[in-house]
């Protein structure tokens, strides 16, 4: 598994479905450079079981992300038509109607591969036939990308394990606190709490207050 933290987020240009139903070509993360933070997350597939709980949970907290100048973007190996249909399907029928943030199309699986979250890989059989080993879907990867396009946080879950959207929001708060105050965030830090200076004295002072 590649560690992308501290590196430029892999670039891509792809089709996406935005605003709950508009299919657009040439979608790219480049449009947010210098302007917004990005939470870019992968999920295994449309019309599955854990996935709608995650996508709807991100939508429920979308205003909180947007208030922090964060763009939330989902991605899977499904087609734009599958994304579109899922976005039109009612929640009580397994759909995600009401989700407004972009869903990127990765049918070629190259985006998932570049972020190293693809659950399988292409191989060649002895007779020269191309085969695919593993699952042709993405793990539940999440990448927090700063305004300079650098990955500052990543987490990858196996397919049965749903993520914590609140934790993603907490990591945004921690990153922005560090950028604004120059202090670091200790274990289980939450917005509104004190940070600490990255020195032995700073650690001692922080621990003394607990």
Image (spheres, rainbow, N blue to C red):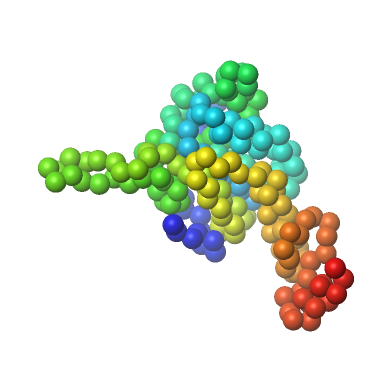
Q: Residue furthest front?
A: 160
Q: Find residue 100 and report its horizontal and vertical position in percent.
A: 63, 30
In this view, the residue in front, 140 or 59, is 140
Q: Quadrant of residue 62?
A: top right
Q: Quadrant of the C terminus?
A: bottom right
Q: Residue, x 58% and y 41% (percent of image)? A: 162
Lateral position of residue 167 relative to residue 145, left or right:
right
Residue furthest to the left in view is 127
Q: Residue at x 41, y 46 (%)?
A: 118
Does residue 184 appear to the left or right of 162 in the view shown?
A: right
On screen, residue 200 above or below 41:
below
Q: Residue at coordinates 74% horizontally, 59% vertically from top-left?
A: 188
- Identify the image quadrant of the N terminus: bottom left
Q: Work out whether residue 18 or residue 201 is closer to the camera in this orientation and state it.
A: 201
- Residue 15 visible in the snapshot: no
Above or below residue 39? Residue 197 is below
Q: Position of residue 127 (x, y in %)?
A: 12, 42
Residue sitting at x 45%, y 48%: 117
Vertical placement of residue 68 versus 49, above or below:
below
């Amino acid at each position: 598994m590649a560690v992308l933290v501290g590196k430029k987020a892999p670039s891509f240009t792809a089709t996406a479905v935005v605003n709950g139903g508009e299919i657009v070509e040439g979608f790219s993360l480049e449009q947010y450079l210098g302007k917004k933070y990005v939470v870019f997350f992968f999920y295994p597939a449309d019309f599955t079981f854990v996935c709608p709980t995650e996508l709807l949970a991100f939508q429920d907290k979308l205003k909180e992300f947007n208030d922090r100048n964060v763009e939330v973007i989902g991605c899977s190996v499904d087609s734009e038509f599958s994304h579109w249909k899922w976005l039109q399907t009612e929640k009580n029928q397994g759909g995600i109607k009401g989700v407004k943030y972009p869903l990127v199309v990765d049918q070629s699986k190259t985006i998932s591969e570049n972020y190293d979250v693809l659950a399988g890989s292409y191989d060649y059989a002895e007779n020269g036939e191309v085969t695919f080993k593993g699952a042709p879907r993405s793990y539940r990867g999440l990448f927090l990308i700063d305004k300079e396009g650098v990955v500052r946080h990543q987490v990858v879950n196996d397919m049965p394990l749903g993520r914590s959207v609140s934790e993603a929001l907490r990591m945004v708060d921690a990153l922005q606190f560090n950028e604004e105050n120059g202090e670091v965030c200790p274990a289980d830090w939450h917005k509104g709490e004190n940070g600490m200076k990255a020195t032995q004295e700073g650690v001692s002072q922080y621990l003394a207050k607990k």
